[in-house]
Amino acid sequence: MAVLETIAAVATPPGPGGVGIVRVSGPLSSAIAKGVIGRSPEPRIATLADFHGRDGVAIDQGIALFFPSPRSFTGDDVLELQGHGGPVVMDLLLRRTLELGARLARPGEFSERAFIHGKLDLTQAEAVADLIDSTTEAAARMASRTLHGEFSRRIHALADALIRVRTFVEAAMDFPDEEIDFLAATELCEDLRGLIDQTRAVMASARQGQLVREGLQLVIAGPPNAGKSSLLNVLSGTEAAIVTEIPGTTRDLLRQEIQIDGMPLRIIDTAGLRPSEDPVEREGIRRARDQIDRADRVLWVFDGIAEPGHASFDASFLPRQIPVTFVRNKIDLTETRPGRRETDAGVEIALSARTGAGMSSLREHLKDIVGFHGAGEGEFMARRRHLDALRRACNHLESAAQILAQTAAGELMAEDLRLAHYALGEITGEFSSDDLLGEIFASFCIGK
């Protein structure tokens, strides 16, 4: 491997703090340590020292830590200079490392080097960013499990099983004159079906992880004065929206982030949808339509007193096939029982945003529609790209099983199995293009 440049960055968040860290990685780390503190610290021993500028004047006093290659986070020589966390102090210290030969690190470049040197696979490297960005306890736990290799182990287990199946198929093609017809063997069919089931199970866990990481975007829509803002308030547990008896109170978008048993929800309350000549209200309605187009799901709220059914609902509000849950509000003023029921138009939840009756049914419904059942100990963090790769792997495996059942064409099976193997390799980074790697690591913060 070619010698990498030495990189440096501030590894702590911007702004004042008790401690600030400048991280250096690369072959010049030891020389930079000598330039800053006058000597190279003992490996993995915290060394108290003055940090000097170019003119020899002390910039700060702090702790220097040196981790020689390969026993470091990145696999390079790594130097950490831990000083007082003032922005000016950190900037002076970083500038000094650049004067001594380092260059400013790109976003995620430290984690990228750890991946390049085999310290982390791609799922673990992504988990570093996910752990930092965790907004819930469940997300932090799942990111930690991914960082410790839980997701990778599941993918490697699938890949190992797939290799055995590929070997079986390749043997059948390489030795066509053998008496045993490998492709007709019951064992191969059972192995392939078992592999498909295992892939689906990993996909279900990955879906859970992706939900915990990204959340579900839920748009509350409907006619004016149906109780949309009241529903937002009761879901979020705050008085986030102004609630009055005057129709059209909400003009702009209101956003709240909540969680239900560890599943994050990004809720957007929108202006009431109705014809209007008011330019401000019309702009609010335009923004509402825009958010509906981006939603994972729409809660269509209607007044259970004014409407016996879903008369206010107009499917033209949905530019694409976005699932809708109907919410019959204000049942505290009617004889309607709270809870869920199936209608010709779809699922309807009867509730009262004012009293809270029926809210538990709505929360359970929101978990059910995405298959979320809590962040269990066996789950891990995942991203949309992981789900896409698992879907492609599963599709190729199912295609191979269909070929086996119908024609037993070894060459076609072998190609589907190869593509499934490649898709799994994309997840861990075993088979990944440079463009994909660049996109992934560019989303990291500078010091990681």
Image (cartoon, helix red, strand yellow):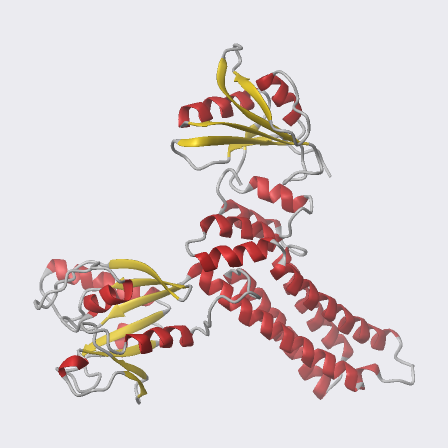
Side of 376 where 148 appears, left or right:
right
Name the image quarter holding residue 420.
bottom right
* Position of residue 65 measured from the top left corner of the image (x, y, whole percent): 61, 29
Q: Is residue 322 visible?
A: no
Taking the spot 69% from the left edge, 32% from the top edge, the residue there is 68
Q: Residue at x 28, y 74 (%)?
A: 359
For the residue pair 46 and 191, the one nearer the viewer reads as 46
Q: Is residue 44 left or right of residue 96?
A: right
**Residue 148: image location, x then y, percent:** 61, 54
- The percent coordinates of residue 102 (x first, y second) are 58, 26
Q: Is 355 situated above or below 86? A: below
Residue displayed at 50% across by 52% down: 130
> On screen, 308 above or below 48?
below
Pick the front one: 155 or 233 = 233
The quadrant of the picture occupied by the N terminus is top right
Picture coordinates of residue 296, whole percent (x, y) = 37, 68
Residue 294 seen by the camera: yes
User: Of 203 and 418, which appears nearest the observer?
Assistant: 203
Image-quadrant location for residue 30: top right
Q: Residue furthest bottom?
A: 344
Measured along the vertical axis of the image, is residue 209 above or below residue 148? below
